[in-house]
Image: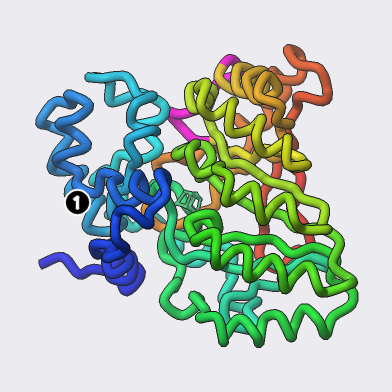
């Protein structure tokens, strides 16, 4: 019998049918609740050979499938090696125990002074604004994160906000998750209004994949609270392959820029997704066409279940050297690793 992790149970609980009347839901919320959550459905919709199903079901037991339709629409049919599908298709290999691959590779549990708040780096604090994501990426370093212990209610936010008010060295609040933009605009507007009132905060940074996987997320309600804050705004997107950037994503980026947002991108170097100079160069070029600057290229965090995505450091360095020969400096992402206990990302 397969044992499900607490994180999975929480995610399943959060995926129970939303009772909000349809009429009150935004287009993006309807797409979020309509995301594919069944491995059989995912394989069927992409015309995958039946041989992929047992592995997909095994992986799904460990970390549930979640793929929005807008992201699925950019995948090639009948191609299990499609670089977008590779990121979301569960595999039997996720169940293999590999030495060195653990559930909390960044030791975040050691840096949570208040519920929903992670303080690892000087001057910056990370707030878990939403426990869920629009897409479940198989390589995610938080795939085992105990969201159920770190999803504060509005009253519990008070402790986090008090922590921020009390530390004048903090100049930047980072909204993370899950995906922070999976929270409602009402919740986010409430939170950002309070952050806005903390005078020593200068910047609001949002780490999100939602404008990529559901571009309709960048709607008037989001742009309303984003435009209203006095804080400087940075949105760090998470895009790993040029095929993720279709015209709807470009339009979403334009809307964000129109609200005064600086757009950056971080990627993860993933075996079978973007582990070639050509794939990385196309990604940087396409990002820039969409008005987004490449920021970081992370090597994989050693999270249990994701070892099959690993690209060794030496190969990563060679890829970046090859990339440097092709691209101008401003299109070069920085190759980094996050090491628990370090005060910043470590360049490779
Ligand atoms: S969107 Fe980000 S946080 Fe969510 S599963 Fe993907 S990588 Fe993880």
Q: Closest to the observer: 238 or 93?
A: 238
Q: Provide residue 254's location: percent of width, then percent of height.
A: 66, 30
Residue 307 at least partly seen: no
Image point (73%, 68%), residue name? 125
Residue 45 on the magenta span: no
Up/down of 161 relative to 101, above or below: below
Q: Which residue is mark 1?
A: 58
Q: Closest to the observer: 115 or 91?
A: 115
Residue 168 at least partly seen: yes
Q: Is residue 293 left or right of residue 43?
A: right
Up/down of 164 relative to 296, above or below: below
The quarter of the image holding the N terminus is bottom left
Q: Which residues are magenta?
A: 270-278
Up/down of 258 relative to 279, above or below: below
Q: Provide residue 215's location: percent of width, then percent of height.
A: 50, 36
Q: Is residue 45 left or right of residue 310?
A: left
Disc 1 element: helix
């Amino acid at each position: 019998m397969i044992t499900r992790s607490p994180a999975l149970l929480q995610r399943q609980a959060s995926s129970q049918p939303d009772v909000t009347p349809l009429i009150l839901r935004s287009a993006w919320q309807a797409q979020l609740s309509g995301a594919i959550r069944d491995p059989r459905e995912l394989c069927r919709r992409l015309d995958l050979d039946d041989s992929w199903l047992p592995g997909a079901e095994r992986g799904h037991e460990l970390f549930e499938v979640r793929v929005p339709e807008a992201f699925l629409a950019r995948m090639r049919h009948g191609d299990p090696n499609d670089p977008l599908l590779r990121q979301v298709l569960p595999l039997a290999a996720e169940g293999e125990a590999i030495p060195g691959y653990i559930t909390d590779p960044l030791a975040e549990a050691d840096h949570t002074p208040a519920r929903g708040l992670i303080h690892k780096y000087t001057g910056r604090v990370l707030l878990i604004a939403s426990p869920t994501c629009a897409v479940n990426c198989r390589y995610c370093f938080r795939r085992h994160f105990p969201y159920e212990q770190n999803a504060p209610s509005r009253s519990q936010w008070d402790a986090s906000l008090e922590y921020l008010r009390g530390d004048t060295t903090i100049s930047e609040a980072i909204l993370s998750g899950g995906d922070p933009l999976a929270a409602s605009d009402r919740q986010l507007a409430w939170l950002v209004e309070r952050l806005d009132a903390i005078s020593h905060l200068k910047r609001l940074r949002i780490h999100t994949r939602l404008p990529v996987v559901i571009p309709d997320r960048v709607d008037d309600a989001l742009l309303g609270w984003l435009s209203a804050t006095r804080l400087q705004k940075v949105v760090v997107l998470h895009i790993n392959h040029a095929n993720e950037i279709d015209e709807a994503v470009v339009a979403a980026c334009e809307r964000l820029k129109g609200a005064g947002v600086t757009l950056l991108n971080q990627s993860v170097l993933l075996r079978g997704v973007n582990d070639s100079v050509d794939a990385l160069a196309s990604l940087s070029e396409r990002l820039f066409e969409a008005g987004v600057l490449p920021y970081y290229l992370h090597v994989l965090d050693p999270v249990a279940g994701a070892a099959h995505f690993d690209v060794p450091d030496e190969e990563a360095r060679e890829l970046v050297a090859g990339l440097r020969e092709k691209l101008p400096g401003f299109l070069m992402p920085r190759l980094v690793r996050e090491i628990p206990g370090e005060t910043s990302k470590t360049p490779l």
